[in-house]
Image (cartoon, rainbow, N blue to C red):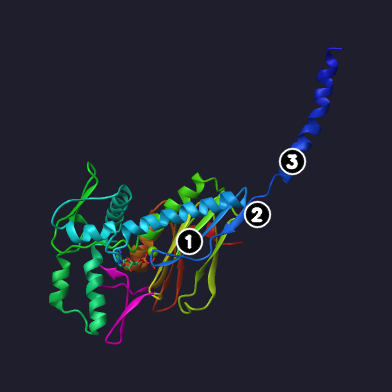
Amino acid sequence: MEENPKKIFYMLIPVIVLCLLVYSKHKKPQILVESGNIIVMNTIAKITAVAKDEKTARAAIDAATKEVKRLEGLMNRYDPNSQLSLVNRQADKEPVKIDKDLFEVFQRAIYYSKLTDGAFDITVAPLIDLFRACAEANTPPTAQQLAEVKEKIGCEKILLDANDFSIRLAAGGMKLDLGAIAKGYAADKAVAIMKNHGATGGLVNLGGQIGSFGTTETKGKWMLGVQDPANPQGDKIITAFALNDSAIATSGNYHRFYTIAGKQYSHIFNPATETSADALSSVTIFAETGTAADALATAVSVMGAEKGLELIKKLKNTEAIIIVAETGQTIKTDGIQKFLAK
Ligand code: ADP
Ligand code: MG
């Protein structure tokens, strides 16, 4: 009699396994919710969440949106009430205490400045402002103006104090611009918050700075495309990519530029030469974080094809696809293969 229940149990194993298989197939499917266009950080953002139900997905999107808006409130130098504006007004005179996120972005920015030999440099703001003023006056900058600006450029002049989260700028008139790193950083923060809110997958697109995690509701990778710089208004995609748990950012001179005396200048500047970086019309970087992708896309735009690709090849889990402005030639690093949509 003792053996019978055991026997029955063993006989039931295949039935139990079958039931589990059927159950997992019929488990509630994941659903995908899209935010629609959100105007934030001077660009159009779109956040997509995958979760077990609509309520969870919407909560994840709302929390991520709130976080991106909070970071914009810290890092927008064109908002006089932002902490960055306070830094730009006061830190050349006295240390300014700042939010931990702003402090972390400054630390990351200094890291990328060193990594790129100064090609990436958030102290470039006075140079940008000079070119903007020159575009308004329609006269190129003078040698004297450029020499004055030079005194204010250089990340080594940013002094951070981790004891009290304060910043001091060593030269009078120095100003910082986070336009090439804030969106990537915000995409990383948004991804983290969505995970905390129970999303199983997500895509955060902050004007081309994209963070992703998990998969779509059909367990597929996130599909993306790089726009044709020769036709920015069109919807032609030159290469399609499949992402999961990675970030991507594109810098290009085709969306924003200054025109002075009939000549176009990219909104990306080379801090060393004090001219705009126009050799590459598009730089797309794949990296583990949005912060890295964003900063490196700008840095490679400044460094140019040869030096830029040399750097990217040295970095772990980092790939690039660049388009040379003059010839239209597209160059990809070898590792890009794993991101190409099949
Ligand atoms: P997008 O804003 O389209 O993502 P980028 O990420 O390349 O483009 O950021 C460009 C912005 O970064 C410029 O508009 C300017 O505010 C700032 N910037 C320009 N040149 C540099 C540079 N060499 N290093 C860091 N930031 C820069
Ligand atoms: Mg960017």
Give whichever of 58, 248 is nearer the camera: 58
Q: Residue at x 61, y 61 (%)?
A: 342
Q: Quadrant of the N terminus?
A: top right
- Crowding at dot 2, Cα within 10 Å, few <14 / some 14-19 / many 20+, comes out as few
**Vertical order, 105 against 278 (above or below):** above
Measure how far apart labels 2 and 1 are at the Cα level. Answer: 20 Å
Ligand 2's image quarter is bottom left
Which comes sooner in the sequence, label 3 or label 2?
Answer: 3
Q: What x and y, as percent, mark residue 174?
A: 18, 62
**Vertical order, 196 against 78 (above or below):** above
Question: Hey, what amino acid is under mark 3?
Answer: Tyr
Q: What x and y, as percent, mark residue 291?
A: 38, 55
For label 2, the residue is: 218
Look at the image and tell me whether residue 311 can be seen. no
Q: Which residue is drawn at 27% across and 69% down?
A: 270
Give whichever of 98, 337 is nearer the camera: 98
* Number of marks in the rendered image: 3
Per the image, label 2 sits on a secondary structure element best described as loop
Q: What are the residue bounds of the magenta stretch?
A: 256-280
Which comes sooner in the sequence, label 1 or label 3?
Answer: 3
Q: What x and y, as percent, mark residue 157?
A: 18, 56
Question: Hey, what amino acid is under mark 2?
Answer: Thr
- Crowding at dot 3, Cα within 10 Å, few <14 / some 14-19 / many 20+, comes out as few
- Crowding at dot 1, Cα within 10 Å, few <14 / some 14-19 / many 20+, comes out as many
For label 3, the residue is: 23
The reply to whether callout 1 and callout 3 are in contact (CB within 8 Å) is no
Per the image, label 1 sits on a secondary structure element best described as strand
For label 1, the residue is: 205
